[in-house]
């Protein structure tokens, strides 16, 4: 969450750095274009769980499913009475509470976050996914896809495109017809992989995105949290950003401050949101197209993308999904699910044309 500010926070014009009570450096914030005062955070209620059992002792554990959760309280820096030798938060005012839960299964991680505002907070946006991705490596090119996005400057963003890093302009997204194929179905993920075009070999693949099935990252909720409109340089309205200059980092806003313009972009006390997202690594050679999954509670979420036509394409998934019932979350109109369950580590999909097609499924 960027640019925290509370109504009673006085503007800080000068910052100093001191050692043993002696000021050794200082600067005036007005001389900088971007100045931020981050809240002091306190962590509590941390828990570790492996294969369903809480881990309370030091040791080496080998588990298939691993979860870690904690609560963080953010305090208003303007209310901290003493900063040295360490900040004292005994009398500081809490701004917000974050409850985090990270779930690791294989090479995938899903994250559940709840945000509770305890004191009016001014902000611009909350980018749940801020993922640095790949750059060109040896003979492998860094390839990317942003499903649901329209082309920009002649580049089809929903099909694999190369970004060598630092040489391209940042790509911005807003919730308008200029950027999206459907303004009511905003972009929610980035797919990336390293590919050797000469040998058609792959090195690694990954995806990062927001959950489509839980929390306030569901399609209809995001349309409420990120209103229609294009304010260009105004980060309070921005939907997302792909930044080649920052090692091909992908930002995707779960919520932004645009709905609170009449409150000077302050979130009200009692504001609550559940922000769920994931990072998933996959083997691009395991399937035609880009196929990955992550675990969400007792179910799996499977994403399959393809840019070629197939009457019946078998998709390979891990054997432990055998017997799981498949349900469609969303898909392109030219895509058809031909299986109802996973059998022998496979299910089948029809792609009626060579457009940028995809299907998102749950398996449980």
Image (cartoon, rainbow, N blue to C red):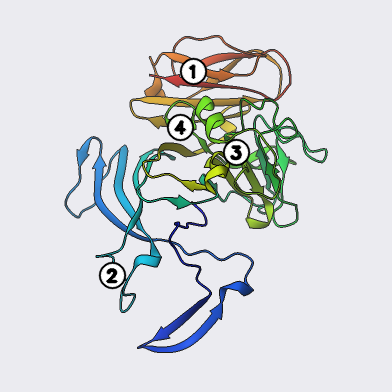
Q: Which residue is mark 2?
A: 88
Residue 157 falls in which quadrant of the image?
top right
Q: Earlier in the sequence, mark 2 or mark 4?
A: 2
Q: How many marks?
A: 4
| Residue 269 seen | yes
| Whether label 2 touches label 1, CB < 8 Å | no
Front residue of 40 and 344 = 40
Looking at the rendered image, the disc whose residue lies closer to the viewer, 1 or 3, is 3
Q: Position of residue 363 (x, y in %)?
A: 42, 19
Tell me the number on the disc at residue 346.
1
Q: Earlier in the sequence, mark 3 or mark 4?
A: 3
Work out whether mark 2 precedes mark 1 in sequence or the reverse, and give the earlier one.
2
- Check the image and name the residue furthest to the left: 57
Helix, strand, or loop for circle 4? helix
Asked whether disc 2 touches disc 3, contact meaning CB atoms under 8 Å apart, the reply is: no
| Element at label 2 | loop
The Cα–Cα distance between marks 2 and 4, rounded to whole angstroms, is 34 Å
Q: Residue 58, percent across and down?
A: 19, 55
Query: Measured along the vertical axis of the image, is residue 336 above or below residue 35?
Result: above
Q: Return the mark for residue 190.
A: 3
Q: Nearer the viewer, residue 295 or 194?
A: 295
Q: Which mark is residue 216?
A: 4
Q: Which mark is residue 325?
A: none
Nearer to the camera, 269 or 348? 269
Instruction: From the image, state whether disc 3 or disc 4 is nearer to you.
Output: 4
Q: Secondary structure at mark 1?
A: strand
């Amino acid at each position: 969450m960027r640019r925290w500010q509370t109504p009673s926070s006085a503007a800080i014009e000068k910052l100093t750095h001191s050692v043993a009570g002696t000021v050794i450096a200082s600067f005036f914030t007005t001389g900088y274009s971007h100045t931020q005062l981050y809240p002091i955070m306190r962590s509590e209620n941390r828990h570790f769980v492996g294969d369903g059992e809480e881990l309370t002792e030091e040791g080496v554990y080998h588990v298939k499913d691993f979860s870690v959760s904690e609560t963080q309280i953010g305090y208003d820096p303007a209310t901290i009475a003493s900063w040295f030798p360490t900040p004292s938060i005994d009398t500081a005012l809490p701004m917000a509470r974050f409850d985090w839960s990270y779930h690791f299964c294989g090479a995938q991680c899903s994250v559940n976050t709840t945000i509770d505002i305890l004191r009016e907070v001014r902000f611009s946006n909350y980018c749940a996914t801020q993922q640095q991705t790949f750059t060109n490596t040896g003979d492998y090119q860094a390839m990317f896809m942003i499903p649901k996005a329209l082309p920009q400057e002649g580049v089809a963003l929903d099909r694999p495109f190369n970004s060598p890093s630092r040489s391209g302009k940042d790509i911005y997204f807003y919730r308008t017809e200029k950027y999206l194929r459907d303004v009511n179905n905003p972009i929610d993920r980035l797919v990336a992989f390293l590919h050797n075009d000469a040998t058609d070999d792959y090195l690694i693949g990954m995806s990062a995105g927001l959950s489509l099935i839980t929390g306030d990252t569901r399609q209809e909720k995001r349309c409420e949290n990120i209103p229609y409109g294009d304010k260009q340089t105004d980060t309070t309205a921005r939907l997302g950003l792909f930044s080649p200059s920052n090692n091909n980092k992908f930002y995707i806003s779960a919520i932004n401050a645009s709905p609170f313009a009449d409150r000077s972009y302050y979130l009200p006390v009692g504001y609550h949101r559940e922000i769920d997202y994931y990072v998933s690594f996959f083997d691009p050679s395991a399937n035609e197209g880009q196929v990955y999954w992550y675990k969400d509670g007792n179910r799996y979420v499977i994403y399959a993308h393809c840019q070629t036509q197939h009457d019946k394409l078998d998709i390979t998934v891990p054997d432990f999904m055998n017997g799981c019932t498949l349900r469609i979350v969303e898909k392109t109109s030219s895509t058809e699910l031909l299986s109802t369950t996973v059998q022998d580590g496979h299910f089948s999909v029809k792609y009626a044309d060579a457009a940028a097609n995809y299907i998102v499924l749950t398996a449980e």
